[in-house]
């Protein structure tokens, strides 16, 4: 087990390193480089940029210095407004985190419950309804859903207040963000529950005289949760990328919307730093999920 | 006395009424008669069996019909509708400024006057957008583009993935190990972020000789394909490799080899047909996800570039003025949902019908 | 009749699939007495397992009993509610299955799963239940029971797992033990051990056993009485001795003929021609007819009636009727 953990951690670190490298060199592949050197900048600005970012050094060295700075928490400065990126991330990430974690919990809990219900009441009305809606919501892109929710509930009906700096209403953003993962998890847990229910050990339990209820909630459920946990990793990735558009649409001041505006503004330093930050987050989440999965399934304990 | 094994105490004659029988009943049955008894189920091929199952699935059939309808529309519409997607509406050669943001099936003042004077004007089925362009034709073109991108992205993914996966799977050993490590690293990269990055860079960087086919497509579309080609093939490669590995081990490949069949023949006749169903299903499900990704990117502004419309960029543009002109969002939204939904349902239906691993 | 433990009367069971109704069991009747070891032998698809599942009423999704009665100590099981069946299963009648690898839940320990069997049908809880589990494990010959109880199924070999299954089945000292192909998935040497174990347990605890298998060797060793099934019907029934030394049904004869004789290596193997029957379209007459060398015209037209060959031997084959007929005619 220990060897497995070390292997996975090393792979994760390698991945983050590769991401940093790709991001760094890609950003520098943009004509004029990330600092818009093709534009006419004042001497003082050039000097300041050179000093801060070691621009006079060869590219490889720049990369290593950049990495070193990252590890020290120095994410650089936004090209657009000159603010410390660390501060930008610091104030916007908590909002995104709150949004993302809520969406994830909603998707996981509701998805598992709905999926198991559908499996249990197979081919009856609840199943058909659940299948219908979950299929529907896997087809609706989150940004479409978000825009429609905004239109209907914020603008037309005015039931939900629009997000502002003072009033943080997470309801609609969480719904929009969790819709797809929840639908996906519903279908996944239905399939895995049906699969678990068709296994031989369920037949054994039945032959022992176990009640239907116990059969499902004790014997089948634990087995059916395993595939759902393995999906948690990609789900986090989806939520992180999804939050970009959701935050933009609902004008939530989270890290995602900052990223989108950085792209629009060609704020390369911010793009670079945010990409690395979010990517590292995803890799870490995947790693944790991998390890969690191995914990839950005792068969893998002894690898 | 040996009595055919029947004890004298319970002669059969007492158990049954033997007068019911005649000599004829005990005449031997011919082979032909026996064959008639043995009613076997109709033999079908795997393909026919799968198609039968597919067409029994109402959702799959509906999706097929829907997709066919959409395809028909986007092929026929440009021939019927006299506007082009980038054409700013004009009446009698004069720019029609009043044709901004018209509601569906309404006309601008200029157009109305023209009609009153006896002219003919094709109705604006979806209205017009903020740049005085007919919205219906724009949605139709956007659908074309989104489907085109989705379809070709899937093909690129398919080709690269298949090549990589089959080479890796068939070669096995060291080569396979290394190739799969590469796949692992690519797989663990956060794809969306990488795509965004690549898009940003390629958009700036790519230059094509003017007038060539590539330049007509636009840098953003080409970069989309490049990006898909670079990142999305890994799933398919893994799948194919897995299939090849499991088939390689299968007895019938061993059997074929033991009677001297060459590797090429083995691949052609045994491995590919078995992979085929998996490939088709996975590709079918790839198209909606590629469409999804493309609309996401277009929504964020780094997808297909104006004036070429994409369902995602149309949806994004609809955000401004959402309150006043909600239909501008509704139409592309519905089209995206229909396309993705029917492709998903079709893929599911294909999987239910053709996946040999599914227990029925 | 009053001492008969289980009486299956004209049982019909079908599966209602997409492709149609699969009539898996078509009019099966037999009696089981306390302490009797009954063997049900037949090919795959003969309906033998489905018969067993019908008794326990653990048929898979689309399966249903469509006719007949199953009397346990005089009461008709087929009319019982699910709750009543839950009280019956594991307590009055237990079942062990073919594949011990997949028959145990991989995410629970052996102790957990066995404790469940004890707690469900007895009053024992906590330490008393654990003590019983330990007792059962020792009974089936598993050493170090305390250690084993804390382990997971995947940590054990096939033979061990089957022993655990047996222990679990016997937890509440059932009247009937049904074993569905208990040794098919095991190595030959382990097979012998498990069969020996089952025999000694039966002697010790005195329960009736229904042994379902396609393996004639297993049947010969263990069973008092044998039922031969084909096409969802009973071909022949009788004591082990009668069936093996005096088979009266063409199918049984075919089965016995096809056993390779290790002493006579030169003899060609004689399989039964043809393929197993398609249960979607049962023929009008005898189910075995298309594969039978001695098939007659009457075999095509009518299902054979069951004829009593001797007091403990009955067969459903028109050949026997022909023999009697010819005798009467005086041929």
Image: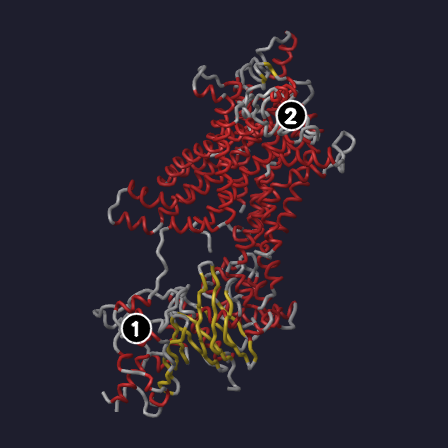
Note whether residue C173 is visible: no
Judge the density around disc 1: few (<14), some (14-19), many (≥20) Cα neighbours within 10 Å.
some
Tell me which corner region of the image, top left, top right, bottom left or bottom right, holds residue A289: top right
Question: What residue is drawn where x is 57% and y is 11%?
Answer: A38
Q: Residue furthest top?
A: A43
The answer to whether residue C311 is above or below residue C142 is below
Q: CA distance from mark 1 to mark 2?
A: 85 Å
- In the rendered image, which residue does mark 1 sit on? C254
- In the rendered image, which residue does mark 2 sit on? B102
Q: Look at the numbered discs 1 and 2 and tell me whether their residues touch, using CB distance below 8 Å.
A: no
Left or right placement of residue A291 versus residue B157 in this view: right
Name the disc covering residue B17, or none. Answer: none
Name the secondary structure under disc 2: loop
Q: Position of residue B286 (x, y in %)?
A: 49, 38
Mark 2 chain: B
Left or right placement of residue C203 versus residue A33 in this view: left
Q: Position of residue A85 (x, y in %)?
A: 67, 24
Question: What residue is drawn where x is 49% and y is 50%?
Answer: B57
Question: What residue is drawn where x is 63% and y is 31%?
Answer: B329
Q: Residue furthest left?
A: C266
Name the secondary structure under disc 1: helix
- Viewer-closest of C326 and C48: C326
């Amino acid at each position: 087990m220990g060897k497995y953990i070390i292997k996975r951690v090393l792979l994760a670190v390698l991945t983050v390193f590769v991401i940093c490298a790709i991001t760094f060199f890609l950003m520098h592949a943009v004509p004029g480089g990330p600092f818009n050197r093709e534009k006419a900048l004042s001497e003082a600005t050039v000097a300041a940029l050179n000093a801060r970012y070691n621009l006079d050094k060869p590219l490889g060295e720049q990369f290593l210095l950049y990495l070193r700075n990252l590890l020290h928490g120095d994410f650089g400065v936004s090209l657009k407004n000159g603010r410390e990126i660390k501060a930008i991330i610091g104030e916007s990430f908590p909002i995104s985190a709150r949004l993302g974690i809520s969406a994830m919990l909603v998707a996981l809990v509701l998805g598992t419950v709905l999926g198991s219900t559908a499996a249990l009441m197979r081919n009856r009305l609840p199943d058909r309804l659940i299948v219908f809606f979950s299929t529907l919501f896997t087809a609706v892109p989150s940004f479409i859903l978000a825009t429609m929710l905004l239109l209907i509930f914020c603008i037309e009906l005015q039931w939900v207040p629009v997000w502002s700096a003072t009033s943080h209403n997470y309801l609609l953003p969480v719904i929009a963000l969790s819709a797809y993962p929840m639908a996906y998890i519903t279908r996944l847990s239905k399939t895995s529950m049906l699969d678990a229910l068709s296994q031989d050990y369920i037949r054994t339990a039945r032959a022992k005289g176990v009640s239907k209820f116990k059969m499902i909630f004790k014997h089948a459920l634990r087995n059916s949760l395993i595939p759902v946990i393995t999906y948690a990793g990609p789900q986090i990735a989806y939520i992180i990328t999804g939050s970009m558009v959701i935050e933009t649409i609902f004008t939530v001041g989270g890290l995602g919307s900052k990223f989108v505006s950085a792209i629009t503004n060609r704020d390369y330093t911010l793009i670079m730093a945010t990409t690395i930050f979010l990517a590292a987050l995803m890799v870490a989440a995947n790693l944790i999920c991998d390890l969690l999965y191995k914990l839950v399934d005792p068969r893998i304990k002894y690898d | 006395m040996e009595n055919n094994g029947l004890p004298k105490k319970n002669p059969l004659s007492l158990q049954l009424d033997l007068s019911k029988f005649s000599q004829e009943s005990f005449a031997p049955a011919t082979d032909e008669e026996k064959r008639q008894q043995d009613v076997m189920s109709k033999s079908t091929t795997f393909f026919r069996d799968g198609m039968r199952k597919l067409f029994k699935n109402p959702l799959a059939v509906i999706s097929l019909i829907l997709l066919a309808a959409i395809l028909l529309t986007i092929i026929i519409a440009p021939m019927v509708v006299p506007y082009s997607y980038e054409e700013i509406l004009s009446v009698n050669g004069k720019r029609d400024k009043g044709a901004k943001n018209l509601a569906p099936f309404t006309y601008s003042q200029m157009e109305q006057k023209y009609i009153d004077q006896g002219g003919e004007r094709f109705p604006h089925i979806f209205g017009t957008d903020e740049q005085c362009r007919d919205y219906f034709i724009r949605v139709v073109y956007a659908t074309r583009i989104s489907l085109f991108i989705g379809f070709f992205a899937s093909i690129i993914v398919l080709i690269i993935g298949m090549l990589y996966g089959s080479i890796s799977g068939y070669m096995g050993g060291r080569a396979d190990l290394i190739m799969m490590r590469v796949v692992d690293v690519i797989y663990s990269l956060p794809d969306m972020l990488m795509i965004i990055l690549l898009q940003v860079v390629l958009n700036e960087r790519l230059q094509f000789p003017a007038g060539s086919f590539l330049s007509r497509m636009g840098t953003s579309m080409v970069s989309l394909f490049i990006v898909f080609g670079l990142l999305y093939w890994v799933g398919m490669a893994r799948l194919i490799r897995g299939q090849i590995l499991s088939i390689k081990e299968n007895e019938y490949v061993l059997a074929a080899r033991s009677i001297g069949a060459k590797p090429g023949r083995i691949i052609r006749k045994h491995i590919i047909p078995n992979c085929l169903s998996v490939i088709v299903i996975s590709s079918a499900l790839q198209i909606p996800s590629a469409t999804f990704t493309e609309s996401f990117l277009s929504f964020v502004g780094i997808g297909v570039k104006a004036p070429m419309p994409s369902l995602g960029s149309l949806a994004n543009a609809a955000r401004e003025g959402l309150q006043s002109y909600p239909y501008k969002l509704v139409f592309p939204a519905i089209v995206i949902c229909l396309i993705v939904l029917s492709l998903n349902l079709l893929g599911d239906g294909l999987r239910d019908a053709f996946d040999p691993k599914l227990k029925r | 009749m009053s001492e008969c433990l289980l009486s299956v009367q004209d049982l019909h069971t079908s599966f209602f699939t997409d492709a149609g109704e699969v009539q898996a069991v078509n009019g099966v009747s037999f009696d089981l007495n306390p302490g009797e070891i009954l063997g049900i032998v037949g090919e795959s698809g003969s309906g033998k397992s489905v018969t067993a599942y019908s008794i326990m009423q653990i048929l898979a999704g689309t399966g249903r009993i469509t006719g007949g009665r199953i009397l346990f100590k005089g009461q008709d099981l087929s009319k019982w509610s699910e709750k009543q069946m839950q009280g019956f299963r594991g307590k009055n009648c237990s079942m062990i299955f073919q594949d011990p690898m997949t028959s145990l839940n991989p995410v629970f320990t052996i102790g957990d799963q066995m404790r469940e069997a004890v707690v469900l049908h007895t009053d024992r809880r906590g330490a008393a239940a654990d003590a019983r589990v330990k007792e059962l494990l020792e009974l089936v010959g598993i050493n170090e029971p305390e250690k084993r109880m804390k382990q997971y199924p995947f940590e054990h070999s096939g033979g061990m797992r089957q022993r655990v299954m047996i222990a679990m089945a016997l937890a509440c000292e059932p009247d009937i033990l049904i074993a569905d192909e208990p040794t098919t998935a095991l190595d030959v040497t382990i097979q012998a051990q498990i069969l020996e174990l089952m025999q000694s347990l039966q002697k010790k605890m005195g329960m009736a056993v229904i042994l379902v298998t396609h393996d004639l060797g297993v049947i010969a060793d263990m069973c008092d009485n044998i039922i031969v099934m084909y096409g969802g019907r009973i071909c022949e029934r009788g004591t082990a001795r009668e069936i093996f030394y005096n088979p009266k049904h063409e199918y049984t004869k075919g089965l016995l003929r096809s056993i390779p004789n290790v002493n006579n290596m030169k003899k060609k193997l004689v399989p039964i021609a043809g393929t197993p029957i398609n249960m979607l379209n049962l023929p009008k007459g005898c189910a075995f007819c298309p594969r039978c060398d001695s098939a007659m015209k009457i075999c095509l037209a009518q299902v054979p009636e069951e004829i009593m060959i001797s007091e403990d031997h009955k067969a459903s084959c028109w050949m026997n009727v022909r023999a009697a007929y010819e005798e009467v005619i005086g041929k």
